Image (tube, rainbow, N blue to C red):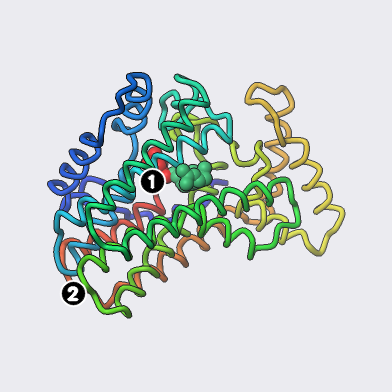
Amino acid sequence: MPPASPAPNALDAKTIYAPVLADLEQVKESLASIMTPETETLGQAIFHALKDGGKLLRPVLTLLVSGASGGISSAHVEAAAVAELIHVATLLHDDVLDDADLRRGRPTVRAGWGNHMAILGGDYLLAQASLKLSYLDNPRLVRIFAIVLSQLCEGEVLQMQNAFDFDTPWSRYYQKSICKTAALFRACCESAGVINRLPEDQIDALKTYGESFGLAFQIVDDLMDFTRTREELGKPVLEDLKSGIINAPVLLTRDYFAETPEKQQALKDTLEALYGLDESAPELPEKAAQLSAWMTEADALNKTVAMAQDYAQKARQSIAFLPESPYKASLLGLLDYALARTH
Ligand code: GRG
């Protein structure tokens, strides 16, 4: 049975993005006007990556927090662009590490231009992010984003180290998820508060919103590996599983069978049989069905939904101090949107 919907009455993206649509256009202009590389091929590769297709969640979050906590300035627009440049750079590098040919329903840069161009393109975008930051003349913002870059690298290494490790402790799962996903969302919220010169306790509350949002987002990402189609995801299904990533539904299933070692061992064997399987592998449907049956027995997908909802609730509570505004309403709506997303 499919899991209960994490957010049955979620607002649509259009409604949530509405308060910052004009500012988001400025972010897009800022992204489109980064220094064009003199080498044409590099230019083609990075503009392919920056072209529409992504949800622009990090800029939207930066702008909504800015609007909800004092107002949106040109510095916020530039910080939002920095966050998106960093995000897209990590995607370019990630696709190299994962040998991924499809993202957002389109060929990846590595598929179109090769691994070298994807790595250099990612580096170029990071350089452009640094350039933008330098114009903001605020060392605290430089620190926020420098720390996040280090965490992104560590998150990726943690994911590699956790891979194929059936005994991965939850603490390592959370550490990986914070570094790889939640830290950048947290940095968006922090930078918005810093630019608005908020008191430190309020900046801390915004950071809690960003990190909790990011964890809920990552947990839903884990769920989608099992519940969405290739078309919905814009990339192959069971991708985490096939590359050995032990995500939240798998950890919950493992824990459920802690008292029945023979079942736990059978689960481990099935996972091992799934690792590295191609989408067209004949044994894939049978192994996937086997795993799905255990997950149903463990109620793992519903438990995953509940985990994501808990983090969304934590995020919700952390912004209770913000005055009512359309921006705050969208920040609340964004939580349900992240829970209900399909891609
Ligand atoms: C510092 C450049 C650099 C690399 C560090 C490769 C790497 C090392 C880190 C990878 C981090 C990574 C890919 C995290 C994924 C986070 C995630 C859930 C991405 C999906 O985000 P969406 O759904 O994507 O917002 P769209 O396509 O909407 O932009």
Could you say where residue 337 lies in the image, as x and y percent from the top left?
34, 52
Q: Nearer the viewer, residue 88 or 103?
A: 88
| Residue at 66%, 51% in the rendered image | 250
Q: Which mark is residue 116?
A: none
User: Would residue 108 be found to the left or right of residue 59 on screen?
Assistant: right
Checking the image for residue 86, the label placed there is 1
Q: In the depicted view, which residue is nearer to us: 181 or 47?
A: 47
**From the viewer's perspective, is 170 left or right of 206?**
right
- Image quadrant in which you'd find residue 29: top left
Q: Position of residue 330 (x, y in %)?
A: 24, 59
Residue to which mark 2 is pinned: 323
- Report x, y in % for residue 26: 16, 44
Q: Residue at x 31, y 56 (%)?
A: 334
Q: Quadrant of the C terminus?
A: top left
The crowd level at tag 2 (other Cα within 10 Å; few <14, some 14-19, many 20+) is: few
Q: In this view of the protein, which residue sits in the foreground, 130 or 303?
A: 130
Q: Is residue 4 visible?
A: no
227 lies above or below 191: above
Q: Amino acid at mark 2?
A: Pro
Q: Residue at x 60, y 41 (%)?
A: 240
Q: Which amino acid type is shown beneath numbered disc 1?
A: Ile
Query: Is disc 1 placed on a helix, strand or loop?
Result: helix
